[in-house]
Image: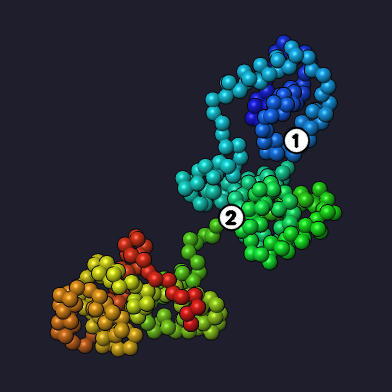
Amino acid sequence: MSGSAALSNASPSNLPAISRSQKAAMVVQFLLRNDGDLPLSDLPEATQARLTRELGALSIIDKKTLNQVIEEFSSELSSIALTAPGSVEAALQSLEGRISPGTVAKLREEAAARAGHDPWKTVLELENEDILPITEAESPEISAILLSKMTTAKAAELLGMMPGARARRIAFSMSRTTKVTPQALGRIGASLAKNYCGVSISAFPDTPESRIGAILNSSSASTRDGILEGLLAEDPTFGEGVRKAIFTFADIPARLAVPDVPKAIREVDQADLVTAIGFAKQEGGDLEAAATFILENMSSRMADNLREEIGERGKIKQSDGETAQTALVTAIRAAASDGTLTLIVPDEDED
């Protein structure tokens, strides 16, 4: 309808006394008669209603008047050099990856605050991937109303993205939406726009489990084990998430692929390697198993040199050994972050 909007803003020509909305109605009727595909549903509801009333009021239009209206409409279209996204959400989608997440969230919040006249427009501009979590958080009745406001094709796609049981509950809830009033519909739309189209990002890019896990990675073994034990006792679910986020020297065989061992140690100082592996062999158990894994999966020449230096090193203090192991683990994490290697994700069912 950008053309009809242009027409409705046109200066009066030598046309008879015709209102801007009447001109728009004439153009719409002309295009419809010629099989024009007009996205009238994109217009605000008030504009759709006014246009429908004007179409209903049209009667016979003489050829001269119609031609002049169409010429004026065409002239306005030819003067348009650029079309913009047309909405904040469309603009945000076109700028995806070019502006910061914080700016995106702030602009969405402002758009939601201004959307009191038609909050549903803001909600329905969301992609189905963003609408799906709404249907999971809201009741089946609210989700049924949301689907009812969507285009048929988009609603069908969204329904197909849901688990079968959830989709059936929402479909059944359609029967409970017959008595929803326009006022209630407006309140529901405003609530959805406020709750789901505003600030939706966390102040932290990582999960709480990842954040505390990263801190514990750099802590001493006694501190790490004590805190993890307490977390598991206090909140088993959170504690288990933290446990899986922790990556220590002893986790190397389970988290590091054999071909990635040379990449993992490439940036580690030779003295740290000797201390870390030597301390691990000295402690035994899981630490020794990790040391053996590293030695067996590097070049035989390098492994022999390390074994020789470890033998000459003698007893290693715990603080020195843990510091060297932390340096090795930090290097592995850095390599994973820059894409040099990929850490194996722990099995979700792992105890």
Disc 1 to disc 2, C-alpha distance: 28 Å
| Residue 153 disc label | none
Crowding near the residue tagged with mark 2, few <14, some 14–19, many ≥20 C-alpha atoms within 10 Å? few
Image quarter of residue 92: top right
Vertically, is 191 above or below 225?
above
Kind of residue sitting beneath label 1: Gln
The residue indicated by pointer 1 is: 48
Instruction: State the residue in front, 15 or 314.
Output: 15
The vertical placement of 96 against 138, above or below, is above
Name which residue lies at 73% across and 64% down: 169
Q: Foreground residue, 97 or 53?
A: 53
In the image: residue 110, left or right of residue 254? right
Few, some or many residues within 10 Å of mark 1 (<14, 14–19, 20+)? some
For residue 265, side relative to residue 177 (left or right): left
Residue 304, position as x, y percentages in the image: 16, 79
Q: Residue at x 37, y 77 (%)?
A: 254
Q: Position of residue 146 (x, y in %)?
A: 71, 53
> Which element is circle 1 on?
helix
Amino acid type at image mark 2: Glu
* Residue drawn at point x = 44 percent, y = 84 percent: 226
In the depicted structure, whether residue 287 falls above or below residue 123? below
What percent of the width, then of the height, locates residue 234?
55, 82
Query: Is residue 198 visible from the viewing direction of this image?
Result: no
Q: Secondary structure at mark 2?
A: helix
Q: Which residue is mark 2?
A: 129
Residue 274 visible in rendering: yes
